[in-house]
Amino acid sequence: MTGHDWNPDLAHTDRSEHTGQRIARVRKLRNLSQEGLATLANVSRSLIAKVESGSKPATPSLVAAVARACSVDPAEINGQPYRGTDKRSDAVHATIPAIRMALAYVEVAPELDMPPRTLDELATELVKLQKLQKAASHALLGAFLSAVLEELAVHVMESDAPRAWRMLNRAQSLAGSLARRLGYNEPPRFRWRPQGLIPTVSLGWC
């Protein structure tokens, strides 16, 4: 997980641009072709082309994959301020809509643009996210958390494995903690699953 809380290369991007246009901007700043970015992000070139043209929306998992490939923060690609008072707090609040979307996939698995990472890979990512939480790196935590929630939702719906549920539980707890730190104070709701109590964190109030 690389990058900074804010990238000066993207500081003056047009806030009216859609996410695909910002992906194209990041790609060009890294001197990558669509094919090159697609290879690094493990997606098809046609998907990159459709997203950049605006004919297909960019999912949180795709944004996270592009961000990893280009060594930028996903919040910069999402590119819209929410309640922030400066560029750092803008970046934190900008992650909330994507997290809200990812949390909606507890009952129905999302349709990802690429296969989810393995549980071992996601476990490593969760450790990194927990370290970001302890370091109060909220912008980076929020930026990468939505993709992890999406990918774990796929594992849960496909396998119903206890490990996948435990990991989803941890990711949802991180989302709830981040939301509370940002001032979204509605408590998490809980639902029972065969493996135990799994919190479903509602961000409908954001």
Image (tube, rainbow, N blue to C red):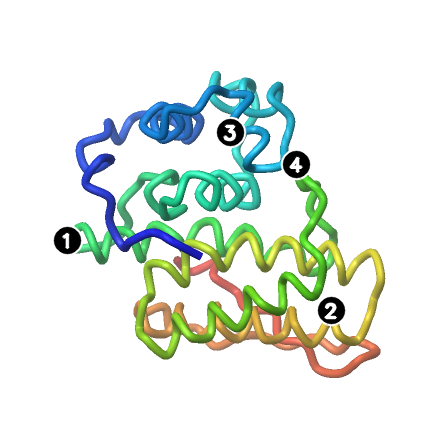
Residue sitting at x 80%, y 80%: 195
Residue that badge 2 annotates: 164
Of the numbered discs 3 and 2, the one sitting upstream in the chain is 3
Of the numbered discs 1 and 4, the one sitting upstream in the chain is 1
Q: Position of residue 75 (x, y in %)?
A: 36, 47
* Residues at marks 1 and 3, CA–CA distance in whole angstroms: 30 Å
Of the numbered discs 1 and 3, the one sitting upstream in the chain is 3
* Residues at marks 4 and 3, CA–CA distance in whole angstroms: 14 Å
Residue that badge 1 annotates: 86
Of the numbered discs 2 and 1, the one sitting upstream in the chain is 1
Residue sitting at x 36%, y 44%: 72
Near-viewer residue (71 or 163): 71
Disc 3 marks which amino acid?
A: Leu
Near-viewer residue (124 or 154): 124
The reply to whether callout 2 and callout 1 are in contact (CB within 8 Å) is no
* Residues at marks 2 and 1, CA–CA distance in whole angstroms: 37 Å
Residue sitting at x 48%, y 16%: 53
Disc 4 marks which amino acid?
A: Asp
Residue that badge 4 annotates: 113
- Which element carries disc 1, helix, strand or loop? loop
With respect to residue 85, does 137 lie above or below?
A: below
Near-viewer residue (184 or 48): 48
- Which element carries disc 2, helix, strand or loop? helix
Residue that badge 3 annotates: 37
The reply to whether callout 4 and callout 3 are in contact (CB within 8 Å) is no
* Residues at marks 3 and 2, CA–CA distance in whole angstroms: 29 Å
Between tags 3 and 2, which lies in front?
A: 3
- Which element carries disc 4, helix, strand or loop? loop
